[in-house]
Amino acid sequence: MSDVSISLRPVAEEDLAMFRRFLTEPYLIGLDWTGFADAQQPARRFALDGYLGPDSSRLMVHVEQEKVCAGFVGWTLRDFGGPTKHWEIGIALLPQWRGLGIGWRAQAMLCDYLFTHTQLQRIQAGTHPENIAEQKSLVKAGFQLEGVIRACEFRDGRWCDGYLYSRLRDDPSPLRAGQA
């Protein structure tokens, strides 16, 4: 169902219910479930800056035909300990919207947005070795696998590895190459 038309838009107050669900419904977010979290945090963050801050932000993944949100994309400013910064992005889609080609397009759209409106050279994303769908999505969104990050995450009572992907400003956009 790759004919689903999507756009990215700023967070609105009615979107906070979805954020609360991701914080309080076990495993709704998939492998990233880390336990129950403060359900009032989304309202506090929205009141602070509408989820459009200088160091971390979110946009909603809006499904045009249905006039609903499938989930959200986010980005955070990171560094490797020096003065050079990069973006780290992530995505969370509700289960009914997964596997429809929405994720890779939303992530590619977010990269194009960040490369257009910020000066940073690098965007990276991490995923779990067992999340084959997200690995394929990242590659389709123009990312390249950089490697395994050993024991980078404590999940389900044990330390787990992760995969690190990146896309650079000069890498071609899959959306501009006619894949969308």
Image: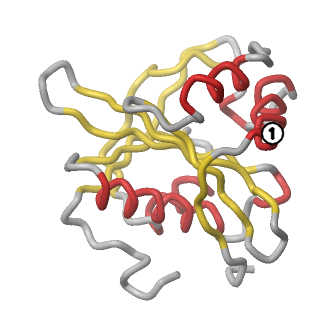
Determine whether 84 is above or below 129 in the image.
above
Determine whether 151 is above or below 74 in the image.
above
Q: Secondary structure at mark 1?
A: helix
Location of residue 45 in the rendering, given as x and y in whole percent from the top left corner? 62, 23
Q: Which residue type carries mark 1?
A: Met
Location of residue 48 in the rendering, given as x and y in whole percent from the top left corner? 57, 23
Report the colour scheme: secondary structure
Image point (64%, 48%), residue name? 72
Q: How many marks?
A: 1
Q: Is residue 173 left or right of residue 59?
A: left
Location of residue 105 in the rendering, given as x and y in whole percent from the top left corner? 55, 68
Q: Is residue 152 left or right of residue 133?
A: left
Closer-to-camera residue (129/58): 58
Image point (70%, 18%), residue name? 41
Point out the image quarter for the N terminus.
Answer: bottom right
Closer-to-camera residue (155/13): 13
Query: Which quadrant of the figure has residue 156?
Result: top right
| Residue under pointer 1 | 18
Within 10 Å of the Cα at label 1, are there few (<14), some (14-19), or many (20+) other Cα atoms?
A: some
Extreme residue in the bottom direction: 178
Closer-to-camera residue (113/49): 49
Determine whether 85 is above or below 112 in the image.
above
Determine whether 38 is above or below 8 in the image.
above
Extreme residue in the left direction: 83
Location of residue 16 in the rendering, given as x and y in whole percent from the top left corner? 77, 35
Image point (31%, 55%), residue name? 117
Image point (66%, 31%), residue name? 32
